[in-house]
Structures are given as C-alpha cells and as structure tokens.
Amino acid sequence: MLPSGAPPESGETTARPSAWTESRIVLLLGLALTALVAAAALWVGFLEYRNHVENARSEQALMARVLEDHATLTVDTAAVSLSALADRLASRHLPPGPELTALLREAQAGFPFLRGFAVLDANGVVVASTVATDTIGVVVDRTRVGAWPAPGRERLGSFVPGRGIADLAQPAGLPSRAPAGVGFIPMFRTVQIGSDASGLLVAMLNPDAFSNYQTLTLDDTRATGLLTSYAGEVLAATVGASVNPGEQVGAHELFRRRLATTEHDTYEGDGIGNSAAQIVAYRVSRQWPLVVLVQHPVATMKAAWWRSMQSTIWVAGAAVLLLGAMTAVACFGLRARERTRKLLNQAQAEVARREQEHSTTLRSVQELIFRTDPQGILTFVNARWTAIAETSPSDAIGMELSALAIPAQRKQMQALFEPASGAGIRNAQITVQAHGGSERRIVDVAVVPLVHRERIIGFAGSAVDVTERVTSQRKLQTQLAITELILQTSPLPLSVRDLRGRYLSTNQAWEQFTGLSRTQVHGHSAIPGPAQEALSFHSQNDDELILRGGRIRYETNMPHADGSRRDVVIEKVLMPGDGGKPAGILSVLMDVSEFRAAERATRAARDVAEEASRAKSEFIANISHELRTPLQSILGFSELGLMRGRDQPKLRPMFEDILSSGKRMLALVNDLLDVAKLESSVGTFTLERTDLRPLIREVVQELAPQIAAKGLQLEDALAATPLVGKVDPLRFQQVIRNVLANAIRFSPAQGIIAISGECPDGQEIVLRIRDQGPGIPDQETERIFAAFVQSTTTKDGSGGTGLGLAICRKILEIHGGRISAQNRQTGGAEFVIVLPAKNFAETIPGLL
C-alpha cells in the first residue's frame, strides 16, 4: 500500500471526455446543413450567371450577324449600282458636261445610303459630281485615291473626311474642312468617258446609313456597334461609341490575333474605345474586307444577373439564419448537460489522478525514496532500489536499511535511526557494494523521522548515488595540486592578477626575481620596492590586453632582487571566467639579459668586421690604382721595344716575355679593381629594359678571333622571341664575356661551344653556355665561384686570378639573378645563368 493513498477499487471506472460529444455532433450537423444551403445558393447563382453570359453572348452574336448582313448587302447594292451606271455611261458615250451630271443624279435617286456619284478623268480632275459642294475641275490627290481597280471590278476605299469627292483634293495629313466624323466611304470602278477616254466612277457611301441602322437594330444605348475595315480603320460607329470614323484601331487584340484564327466569335475582354470589360461579338463580311463589331458592357449583364438573384439570396439567407438559430438553441441545451456531467466525472477522477501522479513521480525520480519503521526496517521503496541494491523493490520490504552499507559503515547507518538524535534531517555518506561486490558506489543518505503525538512512528528518506561527483571532486583536487606544483616549480616568474591589478597568485621564481614574498603582494595592486616605478607602463599594456583580448607580448627593463636591472620579455594572457568574461591576467616573465648582451657583442663584432672589410676594399682599390701607373709604362716600353727589336732575335723574346707578364699583371689589377668596386658602397648599376640576345651576340662577335684561332664551332640556340630583362648592359656583357672566355680557353681544338637561352615560365630567363672541356670536379662546382679559387682540372698555370667567376656571381646577385655550374654527361661543363624577366627597378645600389 502506497503511503499517499490507495488505487481505485476493482470495478470502478473513470469517465473520459469524448471528442464527439452530443453538442459537437449537433453543431457539426447544423453547420453542415447551413453550408449545404449556402453552397446550393452559390451553385444556383453560378448557373444563373452562366446563363446570363451565354444569353448575352448569343444576343451579341445575333446582332453582329444581322449588322454584317446589312453591311454586306448595302455594299453589294452599291457595287451593283456602280456597275449598272458604268454600263450606261459606256453605252451612251457621254462626254463631261451637264448630261453626264444629270445621268449621275438620276442613278442616285434610288439609293438613299449614297451621298452621291462623281466621275474623275485619267488625270484625277473632277468632271462630274452629284454633291453640291464639289467643284468641277478640281484635281484630286491621286495618292489618296490609290490604285485604280481593274476593268469590270469595284474597289472599296478608306474613310474620307469631308462632304464630297472634292475633299480628296486636299493632301493627306492636313485637317479636314468638314466637322469631325463627317465623311464618306468611296467605292471606285473604271469607266469610259466619251468615245475613247477612260475615267474613274466613284460612289460615295454614307457612313451614317450604317450607324443609323446599327442604332435601330441594337435598340440599347449601352450597346455600341462598329463597322471597320479588315485592317482596323473605323468606317462607321454608333453614337455611344468612343471612336469616330477614320480612326485606326488595328492595334487592338481583335485585329492582331483573333481575326487571323476565326472570322466570327464572341468573347469577354477589352472593347474598342472603352476600357471597361465588354462582351464583344464580331463578324467578317462574306464579300468585302469589312468587320462588324457589337459590344455590350459586362457590368450591365452582371447588374441584370444580380437583380435576378436577389430573391434567391433572400430565401437562402433566411434559411441560413433559421438553421443557425436552431443549431445554437440545441447546442446550448446539450452543452449545459455536458458541463454537469463533466463536473461529476472530474470529481470522480480527481482521487485516481492524484494517486496516479504520486505513483508516477515516485517511479520517475532518480533518487531512492524509502520508508522505514522506527527500527530502520524498510516498509516501502521505489523503483530506484534496483539500481542501487540490485534486487527488486518487493524483496527489500522487511530488510534493514543499514544492510546496504559495507560492514565498516553499518553502525554509522544505524545511528541515523536513534530516537534521541532529534527531529531534524539526519545525513550520512556510505559506500555500497555493487555488481556482485566488484564495484563500490558512494551514496548520500538523508532521513527524517515521522512523529505522531510526540512519538516516532517511522522514518522517510532518500538516497542519491554521488560516486561520479565525489570522484570528479577528487580528480579536480588532484589536478589543481598538480597545476599548483607546476606553477611553483616553473623556472619562469609567473603571477596572476585580477582585472583591478591585485595580485592573486605568484610562484617561487617570481618571488626570487622580485625579492618579495607572496604575503607582501597578495591582495595588493601596488608592490613595494623599485618595481613600482614601471607600474603605469604595465597598466597601459593591461588595459590594451583587456580591450583587445587574446594575448600581448612586449619587452622592458626591470630591477632584479640583487639590485641589477634585467632585460625581460613579458607575455600576458587573459584568464577566462564565468560567462566567457575575463577573470584575470596571467603574466610570464622571461629574463633575456644574456641574449641581449650576446646580441650587442655580435653587433659590435659585425661592425668591426665590416669596417675591416671596408678598409681592405679601399686598400685593394688604392693599391690597384697605384700598380696601374708603372704597369702602363712597362707595357708601353715593352711594346716599343718589341716593335724596334723586331729584327733582333735576342731582344724580341725578352720584350715578348715582358709584354706578356705585364698584360697578365694588368688583368689581375683590373680584376682586383672590379672586386673592390663591387664591395664598395659607392658603385651603382643602371638597369635598362632590353633584349639580351643582341648583347650576347656582341660578346660572341668580340671573341670571334679567339674562337677562330682554336678552330672552335659556336652553336647559337637563343630563343626566336625576345629575352627581355632589366640589366646593366656593360656588367651583363662582362658576365657573358668571362664565362664564354673560360669556355674558349678550356675547350679542345675543333670543339663545339653551345649558347642557348629561353624564358620557359615567363618569370625567369635561363641562359646556358656548354663546352667540351675537361669539366669540373663535382666537389668544386660551388667552390669555383669563390674569390681566388680555380678548379684543379683547369688550373694550367696560365696566370688566372680566380676572380672572374666570383665577379660574375656578384654581378648577377645584384641583378637579382644567379649562376651555377655542372658537368655534362657527354663531357665538358655547363654554366647556367638565370635572370628575372622584366624587372621594374631602374637603379639599385651595388652592395653585397
């Protein structure tokens, strides 16, 4: 039995609310009937509207047919009368004059829809007319008449503003002298005038005859009728139309699209001359290029439909209101009865619901809930018991709770149930054997005595498994101890301060560096001693770190505990706190005094070495210049002696040796001067953007005598496209000259020297000079570019200085290029010169 109550007795039932109550069923039926009535009324209205639309379209189509018949018949009659009149004129051979005019008047008497007849001669001169306003002799504008019809055929013309044929004398584009809308529709036929002259017989149809008939036939001021040409020119219109005869409406949808597919139809859409929606019926004449249109406003049809539907709407509205009232009365009565039944069911279900909630809460709680008697014997446990004791809750009833603890802690558990312990909450932490004794779990137990009439009748309590929390706390304590030990044993001075600058922690290295103990600084922002002088400097860096975040590193000078000043590098980082906000600043000091002293010593030594190198370069330059003066004299006198002793066998060899030695000495001096210039700080290289191929070929031409003297063959494999680079032409040629001279010097007689150049990637120019000489030992391919060094295989005792390749490398380095050497598999050496393509620097200092 649960402590909070008992479950419902057997046989009792709890009424559950149903979604389909009687009131809802009645409401849904009433709404369905109401919707059915409304739908029926809408359907009737829809059918009635369709009937009105069909009737209106049929009526407009009938009107269009009647008007088209009339228009076709009228035009046919005019054509017949025109044909008969032409036959009479041809048979009587009447010349222009009163008799011709009388004949025209006689023919017009039987056709009221004609304004009159007129005759034009071949030049467009009016020779006869039944219209009083026409002047005989007036010349008609032939462009307004158009092409004359074929003999025996009639042609219907466009609308002509005016009262007679003489109005055609006025050129097109000028305003008509007749009022707006007044005009005629001409019909032309070729006719014979007199005995042999031909002319044009014109019948002038009155547009008012068409519009009057349309008005009488439609018998509705809201409907409009139009007679147009097939191209869209208005020929006649009723009074209510918004267009006048002579206007163009060919851009309307009817003429652009509909006439091309069907000759007669009705539709709802835009009318002609009216922006409101219209019911339009049109029909094309069977004989003539004419179109008859009848249009009636859709709004008029809708108004008629609405008038016919008003009685139906009143009946449907009354039915809907009646059904709504009946449904509301029925729902009100049924809901009152349902509310009474619901209150009764709620009262019956409340006890069961509370018991259900209490039982569910006890089952779902993650803590062990229990009750015991005054001696600590279990009388109730929830399902959590299984997770802790690994037995079912039913097996726990009658068991002593202290049996959960290990033997060493059972007395501690039994003390919780002592009567003399008081009425408050009693707590204990015990260890429980789990999983068959292979694992121990730590549990917090809390019990509260249940008192009735000042006597303890039992205990209620709970137990929570806190093994993970206790284990985590122990691990955290261990980790904190390890971290503290690492900080204290670190050789770098460390300190932690809060955002207000107060010291929170320092290690032993910091105390040794500053000479201050942690008791002197912890909790204080100001520290005693000389270190206080730089407090503002460090505060500025702290403010920057707090504002910018991350970490900051800077170098400064600080006093040491021994009284000396040390160069230190300080690195600071923000320590995160709650909510992602910084909680403090960790500072690390690194004493770099020894490194800085070493840097200063290195810098001083470098300055001394540079000064010595400069003095050496100046000495070489000076001594080279001093040596040139006597060398010039030696060379000059030796050449003079050689020239004068040409015929003396004993003197000539002596002067030749002197001249050869002098030239070798002069070459050595020149090389020393080049080295001195390159190493001095005053030489400059002036770069020009130029094609390297002509510069290379000039050097080849210069060395051509030496090449021919040894019988060498030179292969030119330079690229066909320009090899453009930024070089000092003289210095670049000096490099090519040195490398090519070496190739000539060490190539065997009748050998081959190849020069190639290309720019494969558009970034660098690669030049290659190959020879067939003895090659270079692999271990010496880099050493030969050092000053005063020659290859062991090419050292022939010819007096070379070993400076040529060193000068080449220095020149190319200044140009931003490089030079290297390698041996060819087929024998000989290959020198590779690489230069940047299209360098943009104009002048660079000649410094190495």
Image (cartoon, rainbow, N blue to C red):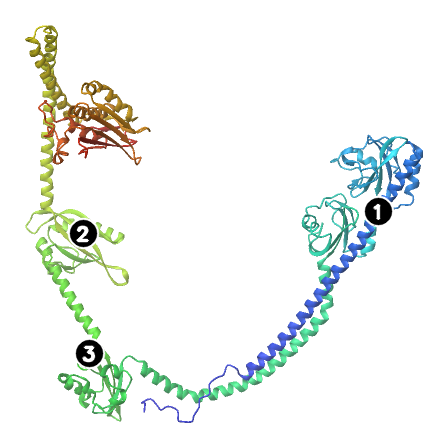
The percent position of residue 349, horizontal first and vertical second, equals 43, 87
Residue placed under numbered mark 3 in the picture: 441
**Separation of marks 3 and 2 at Cα, in angstroms:** 46 Å
Mark 2 neighbour class, 10 Å CA radius: few under 14, some 14 to 19, many 20 or more: some
Compared with 220, 394 (above or below) is below
Dot 3 or dot 1: first in sequence order is: 1
Q: Amino acid at mark 3?
A: Arg
Q: Quadrant of residue 608?
A: top left
At numbered mark 3, what does the secondary structure look like: helix, strand or loop?
Answer: strand
Would you identify the image quadrant in which residue 446 lies? bottom left
Give the residue type that dot 2 points to: Glu
| Relative horizontal placement of residue 716, taking residue 628 as reference (left or right) | right
Whether residue 847 is visible here, answered yes or no, is: no
- Residue that label 2 marks: 571
**In this rendering, the label closer to the viewer, 3 or 1:** 1
| Residue that appears at 58% across and 80% down | 27
* Image mark count: 3
Q: Give the CA separation, mark 3 to mark 1.
A: 118 Å
Compared with 455, 323 (above or below) is above
Task: Sort mark 3 into few (<14), some (14-19) or many (20+) by Cα contacts within 10 Å.
Answer: some
Residue 785, x across and y down, in percent:
15, 31
Q: Residue 372: x percent and y percent?
A: 24, 89
Q: Residue at x 73, y 66 (%)?
A: 307
| Horizontal and vertical percent position of residue 655 | 8, 11
Circle nearer the N terminus (2, 1): 1
Which residue lies under the disc numbered 1? 76
Q: Secondary structure at mark 1?
A: helix
Q: Which mark is residue 416?
A: none
* Quadrant in which the C terminus appears: top left
> At numbered mark 2, what does the secondary structure look like: helix, strand or loop?
strand
In three-dimensional space, the C-alpha distance between marks 2 and 1, rounded to whole angstroms, equals: 112 Å
Circles 2 and 1: CB distance less than 8 Å?
no
